[in-house]
Image (cartoon, rainbow, N blue to C red):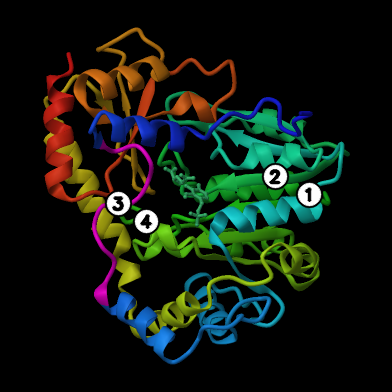
Amino acid sequence: IISKLPNVGTTIFTTIGQLALQHNAVNLSQGFPNFPPDPALLHLVDEALQLDYNQYAPMQGSKALRETLSEKTEQLYGKYYHPDTEITITSGATQAIFTTIAAFVNPGDEVIILRPAYDCYEPAIELFGGKVVPVDLVGKDFEVDWEALKSAVGANTRMLIINNPHNPTGKLWAEADMQKFQEILSGTNVILLSDEVYEHIVFDGKPHLSVSKYLDLASRSFITSSFGKTFHITGWKIGYVVAPKELMKEFHKVHQYNVFSVFRPAQYALNQYLKNHDHYLELGSFYQQKRDYFLEAIKTSKFTVKPSGGTYFQLLGYDQISEENDMELALRLIKEYQLASIPISVFCGPSYNQRYLRFCFGKTEEVLDKAAEILIRIQ
Ligand code: PMP
Ligand code: GLN
């Protein structure tokens, strides 16, 4: 077989998830909440089935949901996206990302990613013949090396992919970062793909700076979000993407022949729910409490902490514990301690030499307690 992706193996989330199951480990690896969504949302799916929202949704997604999302985006970020031409409901943010890449990346085109980078970007770029141009985030704070980014942008650059808040580091971009992105892309034809799936999970009173707030960036951008993260329904695999009309037109050319449209009952339910509930606006404080609970519980452990600024992930450094690389340690913790985490080197390039494991704290206090008890025991 001639593989189109000879260097691609199995995603870390599957590999570690299976091992966690095998070893009956406390699972803080793959990012998903271990508590149920609001029963009111579940009830609305039932209602959708009974009301017979059981046939195809329009290609762009339910019109009512697109209208609600248009209002939401305008209220939150001050940017109007037309519901008919500039918003599309997708099968998770993953499909939005894949389809954007499929629609724009030609063989030989360069796509810049900031490493550590979420793992679905690279294979999609390569599948369409694009060349991945990685720019490493540097230092303990995973800062952008602006000079490196600037010199990575050239005549062949088709796209830049950014992620805010950032998985796996928990980094939240600041105003100065957004201004820099704007400055560097200004005057180029580069398309920006902004992965904002954790837009509502931000901490310490800091705002989420969506690309949609920056007009020059927004005019060249696809911005994707995921209902999975916002409503504790990662298994529904539903999200959306916004972009200016001319860009979205190209997206639809692929989307219509890839999925055409996505699970209709969920779209009815999410629209009704969004119209009547706004507690997703409290999602940041909800997860901040969990972050703080987890950090307090592991206070006496030898792992080092820089509190996460957003997402439901916390990196823990293990310099004082082991000289193993993060993959070795992650595997050993599953086998010897029944605790599963994600080694972040899988999202990094070969020169990455920091030592962190990623833990998902989107869990009940009972599970966080169990994990903390183990983390304290690891010497
Ligand atoms: N981007 C990032 C940064 C993520 O962490 C995830 C996590 N699942 C996704 C995209 C994919 O989102 P979805 O599950 O909606 O496809
Ligand atoms: N986004 C989730 C994480 O980072 C994983 C989603 C997946 O398994 N592909 O943990």
For marks 3 and 1 on the same chain, the one whose residue lies earlier in the sequence: 1
- Kindly check if marks 3 and 2 are in contact, taking CB atoms under 8 A apart as contact: no
For marks 2 and 1 on the same chain, the one whose residue lies earlier in the sequence: 2
Q: Which residue is mark 1?
A: 190
- Estimate the spatial distance between the alpha carbons at disc 1 and disc 4, rounded to whole Å: 28 Å
Q: Which residue is mark 4?
A: 201
Labelled disc at residue 180: none
The magenta region covers: 27-39
Q: Residues within 10 Å of mark 4 (few under 14, many from 20)?
A: many
Q: Residue at 48% of width from left, 89% of height from top?
A: 52
Residue 32 can be seen, yes or no = yes
Q: Secondary structure at mark 1?
A: loop
Q: Which residue is mark 2?
A: 160
Looking at the picture, which amino acid does disc 1 mark? Answer: Val
The front one of 173 and 63 is 63
**Residue 375: x %, y % from top left:** 18, 26
In the displayed structure, does residue 38 sit left or right of residue 129?
Answer: left
Q: Secondary structure at mark 3?
A: loop
Quadrant of res 141: top left
For marks 1 and 4 on the same chain, the one whose residue lies earlier in the sequence: 1
Say which quadrant the N terminus sits in: top right
Quadrant of res 14: top left
For marks 4 and 2 on the same chain, the one whose residue lies earlier in the sequence: 2
